[in-house]
Every structure is written in structure tokens, then in C-alpha cells.
Amino acid sequence: MTSDPFDIPIEIKQAKRKKKSKYNNVAAWYEIGGKTIYLRSLFERDYARRLEASKQEGKIKEWEYEPHTFWFEGIRRGVCSYKPDFRITELDGSQSYVETKGYLDPKSKTKLKRMAKYFPEVKLILVRQTSRKRKLQ
């Protein structure tokens, strides 16, 4: 009797913490709301948990992590694309994007400015980390 090679149970655990980046971010795999997601910082993890709680409470319809990349047509140098951290679908079906930031570096500022210029119809919310304790602003 041959067994199916794809019928192997897979256990996903939180990855070992990687070396911290220059902004002290820690990237790892997390399971939030039945989704296994690779998040780039503890701040993103905390915000994802907050979104899942809002979904469970019926305040939002759905949330997704980095589902869409916006391309800035005609840009040949520097920042030519942008991928917001989260897309939120409200109960009425409208959508907004959320960018979580601990530190707003020059490259991130350029992305946000270009997003406003090239996609003015897209609602983008910037959520800043106010302290090292990852409180949301």
C-alpha cells in the first residue's frame, strides 16, 4: 500500500525569533483568527490581534495582511511600489488600508506621499507606535 506523499501532517509553530532589524523589529509566524501569517514586527502582530477582535465583535467584516501592491506608473528610480500592511473591509463593504509604523523613515514618507498622489481615492490610515510598549496612537 502506497501512501500519498502530500498526506503528511504539518505542524506550524511560531518561528524562532530572527535577529532584530535596525528598527528592533522581530519577524515571525503567528496564528491569528485561524490565519497563519508572517508578520514583520510585534507591533503588526498586536494590530492584527486588535483587528481580529474587532471582527469577532462584529465591528468590521474582514481584514487581510498585505493583500495588494500599488504600483506607481512612470516612476523609474526610487520607490516604485507600495504594499500597505492591512486591508480592512467595513460592514458596509467599503475598504481602507492601514500602515503600521514605529519609525517613519524617509523611504516610508516617500511611499505615503506617492500613494496620496497616484491613488487619491484609496483611504489610507497611518497607525503610529507611540512607545516601545507598542501602544497604538
Image (cartoon, rainbow, N blue to C red):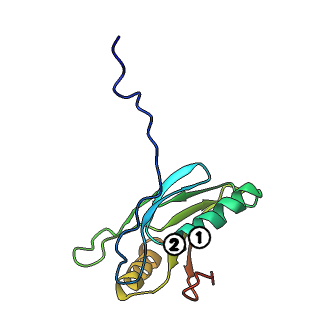
Number of numbered discs on residues = 2
Q: Mark 2 belongs to which amino acid?
A: Leu
Instruction: Mark 2: give few (<14), some (14-19) or many (20+) Cα within 10 Å.
Output: some
Q: Secondary structure at mark 1?
A: helix
2 left or right, relative to 91: left
In whole angstroms, how far apart are the C-alphas of marks 1 and 2?
6 Å
- Verify CB contact (< 8 Å) between mark 1 and mark 2: yes
Q: Looking at the image, which is closer to me, 61 or 13?
A: 13
Q: Which residue is mark 2?
A: 42
Q: Mark 1 belongs to which amino acid?
A: Asp
Is residue 90 visible in the rendered image? The answer is no
Identify the residue shown where x is 58% and y is 64%.
48
Is residue 26 visible in the rendered image? The answer is yes
19 left or right, relative to 117: left
Identify the residue shown where x is 36% and y is 22%.
4
Q: Looking at the image, which is closer to me, 114 or 55?
A: 55
* Residue 16 percent across, percent down from the top left: 40, 62
* Residue 73 percent across, percent down from the top left: 31, 68
Identify the residue shown where x is 68% and y is 54%.
61
Q: Which residue is mark 1?
A: 46
Q: Residue furthest left?
A: 76
